[in-house]
Amino acid sequence: MIDLNLPVKTHDEDRQGEALMLEQLPNKNNGRKLYIESYGCAMNFSDSEIVASILSDQGFETTTDFNKADVIFINTCSIRENAEVRVRNRLKEFKVAKSKNPGMVVGVLGCMAERLKSKFLEEEKLVDVVVGPDAYRDLPNLIDQVDSGQKAVNVLLSREETYADVTPVRLNSNGINAFVSIMRGCDNMCSFCVVPFTRGRERSRDAVSIVKECTDLFEQGYREVTLLGQNVDSYKWQKPKQNDEADQQASPAEADLEGSAGVVNFARLLELVALIDPELRVRFSTSHPKDITDEVLYTINKYDNICNYIHLPVQSGNSRILDMMNRTYDRDWYIDRINAIRRIIPECAISTDVITGFCSETEEEHQDTVSMMDYVKYDFAYMFMYSERPGTLAAKRYPDDIPENIKKLRLQEIVAKQQQYSLVRLQAQLGKVQKVLIEGYSKKSDQDYCGRSDQNAMVVFPADERFKPGQYVNVLAERCTTATLMGRIVD
Ligand code: SAH
Ligand code: SF4
Ligand code: F3S
């Protein structure tokens, strides 16, 4: 295990005196109940745990029943139009709850808050507070403002904020898997994508704080961490130079963390987290085809506890469309990266994201996406129809000119294709022994356990008293559907 008793300077250190004084005062929020609901990507779910932490320091307790809440937060997603529609519909339900309890505070957090800013207050009268992803430290003040009868907004984006020193309060946790945010924002400008506008510039979180959070999770019994970022391969962190002489004498652990050049890249970070303990599984998302290096692939292959699973969104199999999407790679480049994965990690599962019906996409170009699926034979895919997002490069430059029915037909075609390959992939695992981390009882039966294989396949098998959730078992895969392997524990 790595010794992490390193001097970590946090944003809050300068304010410790102030925090101590506050702690001595009776906290007016003690016992107030917070309900928080999350939409969108894992990053949003992870952010909600930061929000819960910031508010639990203020005396709030979380509740899972919004009717009993004093504060309702909805952490929102803007990625496609229907993600926003879902949020608006949910707000209608909160409106009913608020009509019964007028003191209730309703807040919109996350990407939709950032995109719409104070417009939200005009559009949705029940909303009291609008807070963007980089402003969560301000939540206690904003709630105070609402308590004093005002509406409150903070949607400032930051170039530095990573919440590195905030220990997330795990929500809906099974005590086994946890998300750990390693970076924020995105500097890529994919023309279809709203994320650079809602999450701001890319910044990497302090590696020391990441390894410490993962070590603490392991010590609390967690057995799997998923390192999160919009583009994990561009993770880069360097310990700030210190002038103090004492600080210059780095401990062995510090030297280990920094590596020879003093820079921690993603491959190095993966390694540092993998070294915490061989019993801690490491996953990560999302890799970007332009940035994923062979060094990362060799690191995955070197450590048994870094899972053999890579999510590598292709978006389209056609180079002209990829260029219009501003993905900065072409079909050949993507295929080269797939070949590198197959060569360096032969057993690696690969999943992807695909968009159908992007601006001006012809049937022939769509068929390039289909043939890419035939080439890679993805284990899993998330597939979407293009949804124009206001303010994005594509919305400004290109008409959204593929009719809805064509987008849908293309989507149906690739969904059917993917079903076929998901089945083929799982069938290839039959007769093989899978190392499964037990996550709990299966949704369908309390006689069965479920968990994931190294390659991220869901595995269901008869529960056995000798093993508990959080333990690893060897499961012989005997049958499968398109989504699940089924089998039995073997020694
Ligand atoms: N950072 C990740 C993606 C995050 S968004 C990456 O670069 O791969 C998750 C997925 O949503 C994207 O991969 C894309 O397939 C899809 N998506 C993003 N914007 C979209 C839009 N405007 N319409 C349809 N799908 C979109
Ligand atoms: Fe969006 Fe592209 Fe950034 Fe992914 S890499 S979040 S798709 S801009
Ligand atoms: Fe959605 Fe924001 Fe994530 S737009 S996908 S919640 S970064």
Image (cartoon, grey):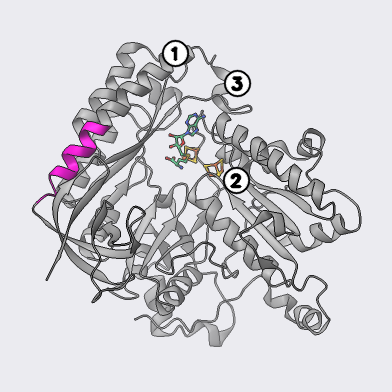
Q: For the residues labelled 2 and 3, say whether their Cβ atoms are less than 8 Å apart.
A: no
Image mark for residue 405? 1
Prevalent SS, magenta region: helix
Instruction: Verify whether residue 429 appears in magenta.
Output: yes
Q: Which quadrant is the C terminus positioned in?
A: bottom left
Split into 4 quadrants, where in the image is the N terminus?
bottom left
Q: Callout 3: 10 Å neighbours few (<14), some, many (20+)?
A: few
Q: Element type at marker 2?
A: helix
Compare marks 3 and 1 and give the one earlier in the sequence: 3
Q: Residue 165, image x and y in percent?
A: 59, 70
Earlier residue among tags 2 and 3:
2
- Residue 396, which numbered label? 3
Q: Is residue 317 above or below residue 163?
A: above
Residue 129 appears in view: no
The reply to whether residue 158 is in sight is yes
Q: Identify the residue under disc 2.
A: 199
Q: Is mark 1 within 8 Å of ligand 1?
A: no
Point 20% across, 44% down: residue = 340
Q: In the image, which residues are magenta? A: 419-430
The residue at label 2 has a CB less than 8 Å from ligand 3 = yes
- Whether residues under marks 2 and 1 lie with C-beta atoms below 8 angstroms apart, the answer is no
